[in-house]
Image (cartoon, helix red, strand yellow):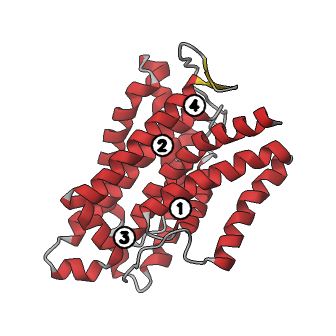
């Protein structure tokens, strides 16, 4: 039992790291733009399919697919912002309209992936050497260890960007009070476009990690990751990237440890039970920045 628990903790850290990146990118988007991006899961799976195509068509391994996904998805996010988001500002209820619009985008992206890749589940048949590593008494696949290391590096880079650079501080200020930073002369449109592109780029990176960590993915996997993302940002506090990071790890640990003691179906209920408990007893989440509207 001890080994099973240790294995659950290690897997929880790996899976939680992926969940943390999903939540961090999604909460950046909501915090700066107040956009409820229900298509975020499809963007993540789009990164997985990009890694799949690069590997099977061009022989590019997943680690080299990471910068390709980051750059290409960042550019796509920048273009998508100007195509979709400015129209929401003229709406009477931008948040509700963003949910409806992005839900439509999620359906369109899922249909596009279904058209290109059909409904079959896909996986990247890439193996590291050695295949597994021993961490204490537990053997963990090298792919998962690499994914965890990448998650830590990307999370640290995003944290450093948010707290140590002028654009990052501007993003945090926009989360706290959009009106105040406009008075200070910040171009909120350019900042919002950058936030959307950054969130989309992080989604692309996360998609490559999903292809490494999980056994398979398909065109219909997107909503699952969107739901996980929303759970994480609620747990971590709306608009708080650091809270989303901590909440993603906590959610992954709870989910994976629950599988040690409970059947798979009940283990998923435990994760949702954590969400309900947080909403009931600490409705601001683990951490919450003061958000201005």
Mark 1 or 4, nearer chain start: 1
Question: Element at badge 2?
Answer: helix
Q: Position of residue 10 (x, y in %)?
A: 64, 37
Quarter of the figure with residue 196: bottom left
Q: Confirm or deny contact between disc 2 and disc 1 (CB under 8 A).
A: no
Closer to the eye: label 2 or 4 = 4
Residue under label 3: 33
The furthest residue to the top:
129
Count of numbered tags: 4
Residue at screen point 70% across, 52% down: 254
Image location (x, y in percent) of residue 239: 44, 69
Image depth: mark 2 or mark 1 in front = 2
Q: CA distance from mark 4 to mark 3?
A: 33 Å
Disc marking residue 38: 1
Q: Relative to 87, is 54 above or below?
A: above
Kindly tell me whether residue 82 is visible in this rendering: no
Tag 4's secondary structure?
Answer: helix
Judging by the rendered image, the residue that carries numbered circle 4 is 144
Residue denoted by label 2: 206
Mark 4 closeness class: few <14, some 14–19, many ≥20 residues within 10 Å: many
Which of the two discs, 1 and 4, sits closer to the camera? 4
């Amino acid at each position: 039992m001890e080994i099973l628990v240790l294995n659950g903790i290690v897997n929880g850290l790996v899976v939680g790291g992926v969940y943390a990146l999903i939540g961090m990118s999604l909460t950046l988007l909501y915090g700066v733009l107040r956009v409820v991006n229900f298509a975020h899961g499809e963007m993540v799976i789009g990164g997985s399919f990009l890694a799949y195509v690069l590997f099977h068509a061009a022989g590019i391994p997943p680690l080299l697919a990471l910068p390709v996904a980051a750059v290409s998805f960042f550019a796509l996010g920048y273009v998508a912002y100007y195509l979709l988001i400015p129209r929401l500002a003229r709406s009477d209820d931008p948040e509700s309209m963003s949910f409806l619009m992005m839900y439509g985008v999620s359906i369109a992206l899922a249909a596009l992936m279904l058209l290109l890749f059909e409904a079959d589940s896909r996986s990247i048949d890439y193996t590291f050497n050695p295949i597994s590593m021993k961490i204490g008494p537990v053997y963990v696949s090298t792919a998962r260890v690499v994914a965890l290391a990448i998650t830590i590096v990307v999370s640290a880079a995003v944290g450093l960007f948010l707290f140590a650079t002028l654009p990052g501080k501007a993003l945090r200020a926009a989360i706290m009070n959009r009106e105040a930073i406009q008075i200070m002369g910040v171009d909120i449109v350019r900042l919002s476009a950058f936030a959307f592109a950054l969130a989309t780029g992080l989604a692309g990176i996360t998609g490559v990690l999903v292809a490494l960590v999980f056994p398979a993915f398909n065109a219909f996997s997107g909503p699952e990751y969107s739901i996980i993302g929303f759970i994480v940002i609620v747990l971590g506090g709306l608009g708080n990237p650091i809270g989303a990071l901590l909440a993603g790890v906590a959610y992954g640990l709870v989910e994976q440890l629950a599988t040690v003691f409970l059947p798979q179906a009940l283990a998923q209920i435990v994760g949702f039970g954590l969400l309900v408990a947080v909403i009931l007893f600490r409705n601001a989440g683990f951490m919450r920045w003061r958000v201005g509207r």
